[in-house]
Amino acid sequence: IQQHSGYGPRIREVRITPIAIQDPPLLNAAGLHAPFALRTVVELETEDGIIGISEIPGNEATNQALEEASRLVIGKDVYQLTKLQQELEAYFGKDSVADRGDAPWDQRKLVHVFSALEVACLDCIGKLVNRPVVDLLGGKMRDSVPFAAYLFFKYEGAGGDWGFGKDPDAGAWEAARQEEAVDPAGIVKQAIAMCKEFGFQSIKLKGGAFEPELEVACMQALYQEFGPEMPLRFDPNAIWKRETGLKFGKIMEPILEYLEDPVRGQENMAWLRRQIKTPLATNMCTTSFDEIPSAILLGSEDIILSDHHFWGGLRASMELSRVCSVFGRDLSMHSNSHLGISLAAMVHLGAALPRLRYALDTHYPWQSEEIITGGRLAFENGAVQVPSGPGLGVELDRASLEKLHQNYLKCGLKKRDDQIEMQKVHPDWTFQKIRW
Ligand code: GKR
Ligand code: MG
């Protein structure tokens, strides 16, 4: 069979810009967020001057792989995505399941590289055919995509140059975002402020930072405050032992919409899932197609929290939705600290999914900066309208990109390491993948 080499516009240039964005001191199972979160912005320019963009988590090793990948990508037709993926795999090989690492976030390199290139190509294709990305994924199933309030335990501080200090000029939510939240009263206050600002209609609390008793008391306080109409989720990032998952899973059974990664690994998740009624969700134990057979065999989760940044792009996430529906699983979305290019891509995907039962995760309220023209994307009643312009429907603001790139150069961070940040506050603290 003759290989089709394609005849769409070819990629002339790939630009990779690491940026650093202000991030408050948020706590999680692996430690503390640094004052700056890293992202990487990728631009693909075609020979006829069309520019496609994407955004992925920032990491020096991934950026180096992206630089290497650009050499393979130059001269390729933007439409030939499957072939492009095959060529990248032939050159780099594939990430292994173990490459994901034990931290709450995914540390694989190549999945991020491919996702960055795929989303930028889809942005180009959308611009070429004058259609939004959602239409390239099968069309719009909803006009806006609902997100959940994503609460964090945190130390006082605005992050960025303010560090643990506060920006005195901040407005309502911006001021609330800087407050300490280490107990039920602080978490409830954070939830009220975030829901008031963005209109969220589901709430997730990131746990794994304190003893289960305290964190579960926070969930109970949220339930008291918002009542049974507000869906609640809790995510300790797999730091609990089986018995802890069972004890607190049972206690939270009456108040949770779902429980996210209470325990580590598919076997432990499957064990717990057999004993409690609450649906289990994951962005940690089933994170690639290679893990689907064992996930189904064992029955490790009810909901897969996809993330186009590490599931291999937007089309792969659509394929995952089909797999989920075949096996009676739901699909929703995971997030990390991010800006508007990622949010736009998440919204296009969320809008294209045939079934969307659960509001998606987003860290967006924790960020204050932007790299897209027109400023930050708006939430209405907790949802974001699907951008209607061609491609992702968002454009790079070059002045902001440059400013945030300067932040990257100044802050000196090269990859996310929450343990190091935590040790600046508690020198003896070490990450334990199962703590309680
Ligand atoms: O931002 O600290 C964080 C989160 O813990 C993040 O890294 C996780 O990947 O949001 C994520 C999750 O749902 O596990
Ligand atoms: Mg999670």
Image (spheres, grey):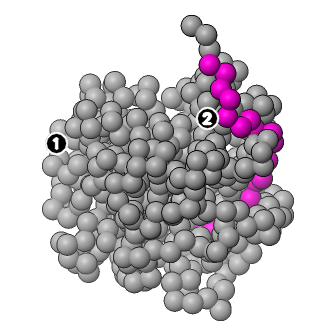
Residue found at x 64% / y 84% = 166
Q: Name the spot of residue 383 as percent of width and height, x first.
A: 40, 69
Task: Please tell me whether residue 196 is drawn above or below residue 308 in the rendered image.
Answer: below
Label 1, label 2: how many angstroms apart (C-alpha)? 47 Å
Is there a contact, CB below 8 Å, between mark 1 and mark 2?
A: no
Which of the marked residues, 1 or 2, is nearer the chain's N terminus? 2
Question: Which of the 4 image quadrants contains residue 158?
Answer: bottom right
Q: Which mark is residue 79?
A: 2
Is the CB–ligand 2 distance for label 1 below 8 Å?
no
Q: Which mark is residue 321?
A: none
Task: Please tell me whether residue 318 is drawn above or below residue 233 in the rendered image.
Answer: above
Does 6 appear in magenta? yes
Q: Name the spot of residue 375 as percent of width and height, x first.
A: 63, 74
Looking at the image, residue 73 sits to the left or right of residue 228; the answer is right
Residue found at x 44% / y 67% = 385
SS at mark 1?
Answer: loop
Instruction: List the residue tagged with mark 1.
Output: 275
Crowding at dot 2, Cα within 10 Å, few <14 / some 14-19 / many 20+, comes out as some
